[in-house]
Amino acid sequence: MPAYLVRTIEEHDLVGVFYASNPLELAFLIDEVLDPDGCEYRKLSRGGVIWEGPAVQIPLPRSKDDDTSPDGIPWKDARFTEVWGYDALYKKARWRKMEYTVEDLYGIDPETPDPERPPRPTTSASRPPGKVLPFKRRL
């Protein structure tokens, strides 16, 4: 399964690194944070995210004095491996615009308002009366 580096088209802000089978699956993952239509992506070669210095303890310890993110992971010590860092920052590679929109993913246009529900009948007069059906007894 390939790894993808995703950034916004206009500002070139990093959105994230994702593993996905194909660009459609990637679009669903991007949709968790923003509209995939405003993003571009590129495949990454082998590599990963590493922590320099002492190893990160698993499970992560909880400490009030620890300089970690809310989920407890010390991201300040993490960095891309050399290959991913080169791919992300220096390599002149072709970025591809995400071809899928939210409408493509879910079949709806997010700008379209929800349809109004039909009004419920307020009286029983609008309903037809029920019928009683006689059944013959079997002998």
Image: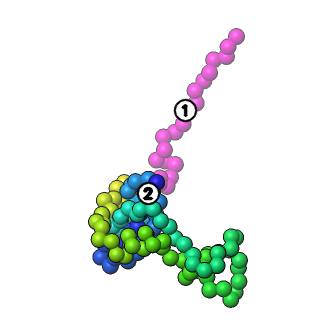
Q: Is residue 125 visible?
A: yes
By secondary structure, the bulk of the magenta-drawn segment is best described as loop
The relative height of residue 62 versus residue 130 in the rendered view (above or below) is: below
Magenta span includes 129: yes
Side of 102 where 17 appears, left or right = right
Query: Who comes first in sequence, dot 2 or dot 1?
Result: 2
Nearest-to-viewer mark from 2 and 1 = 2
Name the residue at the top extreme: 139
Name the residue at the bottom extreme: 65
Residue 2 is tagged as 2
Magenta residues span: 117-139
Magenta span includes 101: no
Q: Nearer the viewer, residue 123 or 80?
A: 80
x, y percentage for residue 32?
46, 66
In terms of secondary structure, where does tag 2 sit? Answer: loop
Residue type at the position of mark 2: Pro
Q: Residue at x 52, y 39 (%)?
A: 129
Q: Residue at x 33, y 62 (%)?
A: 98
The relative height of residue 64 versus residue 100 in the rendered view (above or below) is: below
Q: Nearer the viewer, residue 6 or 44?
A: 44
Q: Is residue 70 visible?
A: no
Q: Nearer the viewer, residue 96 or 102?
A: 96
Graded by Cα atoms within 10 Å as few (under 14), some (14 to 19) or many (20 or more), the crowding at tag 2 reads few
How far is mark 2 from mark 1, CA to CA? Answer: 64 Å
Location of residue 41 (image quadrant): bottom left
Q: Residue at x 60, y 80 (%)?
A: 53
x, y percentage for residue 34?
41, 70
Q: Which residue is mark 1?
A: 131
x, y percentage for residue 10?
30, 76
Quadrant of the drawing holding the C terminus: top right
Q: Residue at x 34, y 75 (%)?
A: 90
The relative height of residue 14 versus residue 106 in the rendered view (above or below) is: below
